[in-house]
Image (cartoon, grey):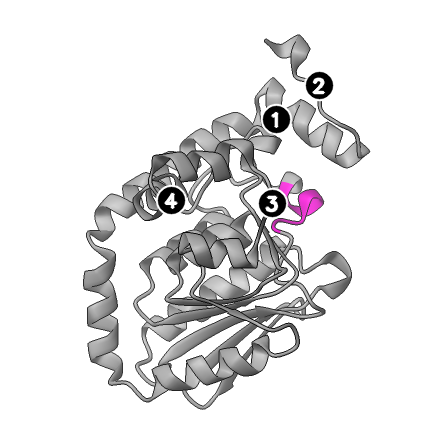
Amino acid sequence: MSDDVIITRDGHILDIRFNRPDKKNALTLKMYSAMTEALAAAEKDLDVRVVLFHGAGGNYTSGNDVNDFLSKPPIDESAPALQFISAIARATVPIVAAIEGVSVGVGTTMLLHCDYVLVTEDARLQFPFINLALLPEAGSTRLLPRLLGYTRAAELTLLAEEFSGARAVELGIASKTVKSGKIHEEAKTVADKFTAKPPKAVRMAKRMLKGEQARMDAIIAEEARIFGQQLTSPEAREAFSAFIEKRNPDFSALS
């Protein structure tokens, strides 16, 4: 297990903490694999009554570690990132997330599969995929319009601008705002509430609330297929080159 993600048990709580504070908790392939394995084990163990995601050092996660991501891009379902997305989308165990600082990319799309999301008012969330010439993932192309309506979903994904934790609560992406410095304490309180509920009934209720899993699996697979195609496109090459070189991308020559 990588030290970049700390996975521990606290009674009935499975605690998953992103632990790369110097990189704003950017996610690596090893981190994805460790989290997928932990979620799979939790699904088989009714003694795990809630999973708690949070980040070290004042941030949730800045999304994918770009160098690690480009070294082995997710072009098929065996990719660690896609394995994690599948695991969290299929999870029936309740999931709580505590968001502070930045929450970018998969750090934000994964929240659509969580059951309770705490966020500081000044947290900065973003669906940045279009800026990298990529497609939003984790079923977000279906979940966001269903949650927000088309217009607001389009604003968040097609303009790909940052929005605050307070805005996330207003939109329904997050459950509640918490003062900075109190979020981990509050997240533990919420997690404890889940542990007091009948675990089997909670999991069955969550499964029914989420609806037909086969349909979501198909959406995630189609997103991944297009995502993989776009990764090799001239648009994506320019977008990633600009990101690495810390300059504005120029798509004018590609039209």
- Mark 1 is surrounded, within 10 Å at the Cα level, by few (under 14), some (14 to 19) or many (20 or more) other residues, namely many
Residue at mark 4 = 144
Towards the viewer: 52 or 38: 52
Query: Residue 180 has which mark?
Result: none
Q: Earlier in the sequence, mark 1 or mark 2?
A: 1
Q: Earlier in the sequence, mark 1 or mark 3?
A: 3
Q: Is residue 125 above or below residue 178?
A: above
Q: Earlier in the sequence, mark 4 or mark 3?
A: 4
Percent across and percent down for residue 32 are: 54, 58
- Tags 1 and 3 touching, CB below 8 Å: no
Disc 4 marks which amino acid?
Leu
Separation of residues labelled 1 and 2 (CA atoms): 11 Å
Identify the residue shown where x is 30% and y is 81%. 46
Residue at mark 1 = 236
Q: Secondary structure at mark 1?
A: helix
- Mark 4 is surrounded, within 10 Å at the Cα level, by few (under 14), some (14 to 19) or many (20 or more) other residues, namely many
Q: Secondary structure at mark 2?
A: loop
